[in-house]
Image (cartoon, grey):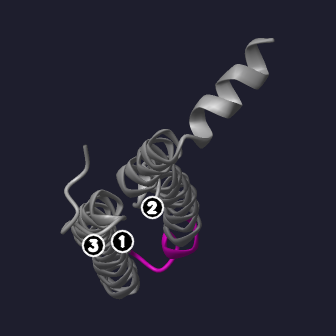
């Protein structure tokens, strides 16, 4: 027999209080995970941008100086051929740089941009909530029959 001093919905209130506490902890942990993933992605993006900027600055500042210095060392008749050959080599290097930048971009893009684990955890949390509320059983029974 039920205790007459105990409120009618005491068990439901206790269970809802536990659920609310679990949901608060779960939301806090999911927020921390999302922040950590976004921070890691931002660091990867920053590293890529720094490397591309540094390489670009070094190439753009050194090549004209080297070409002029080398052309000044040559006799007058050989300068146009040297500049043509060097220009071709620079063009080939520029194309190789574009290919390298394209590959770096693809590698960066293929690594995704964070939140994969957070989204997976949220999907698992949704399944857990559906099972806890009994909605998961209805879906499972409806899809089997």
Identify the image quadrant of the N terminus. top left
- Left or right of 71 on screen, residue 78: right
Question: Is residue 26 among the parts visible in the rendering?
Answer: yes
The image quadrant that residue 84 belongs to is bottom right
Asked whether the residues under the numbered discs 1 and 2 touch, taking CB atoms below 8 Å apart as contact, a structural biologist would say: yes
As displayed, is residue 90 above or below residue 62? above
Rounded to the nearest angstrom, the CA distance separating label 1 from label 2 is 9 Å
- Left or right of 78 on screen, residue 40: left
Asked whether the residues under the numbered discs 1 and 3 touch, taking CB atoms below 8 Å apart as contact, a structural biologist would say: no
For mark 2, give the secondary structure: loop
Which is more toward the observer, 14 or 7? 7
As displayed, is residue 95 above or below residue 135? below
Answer whether residue 61 is magenta in the image: no
Kindly identify which residue carries mark 3: 24
Q: Which mark is residue 113?
A: 2
Kindly identify which residue carries mark 1: 45
- Magenta-colored span: 75-81
For mark 3, give the secondary structure: helix
């Amino acid at each position: 027999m039920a205790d007459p001093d105990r409120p009618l919905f005491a068990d439901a209130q206790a269970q809802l209080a536990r659920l609310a506490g679990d949901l608060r902890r779960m939301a806090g942990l999911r927020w921390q995970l999302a922040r950590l993933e976004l921070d890691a992605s931002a660091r990867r993006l920053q590293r890529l941008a720094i490397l591309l900027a540094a390489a670009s600055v070094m190439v753009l500042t050194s090549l004209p100086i080297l070409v002029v210095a080398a052309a000044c060392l040559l006799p007058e008749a050989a300068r146009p051929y040297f500049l043509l050959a060097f220009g071709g080599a620079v063009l080939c290097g520029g194309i190789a740089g574009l290919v390298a930048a394209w590959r770096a971009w693809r590698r960066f893009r293929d690594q995704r941009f964070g939140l994969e684990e957070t989204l997976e955890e949220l999907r698992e949390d949704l399944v857990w909530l559906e099972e806890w509320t009994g909605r998961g059983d209805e879906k499972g029974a409806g899809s089997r029959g």
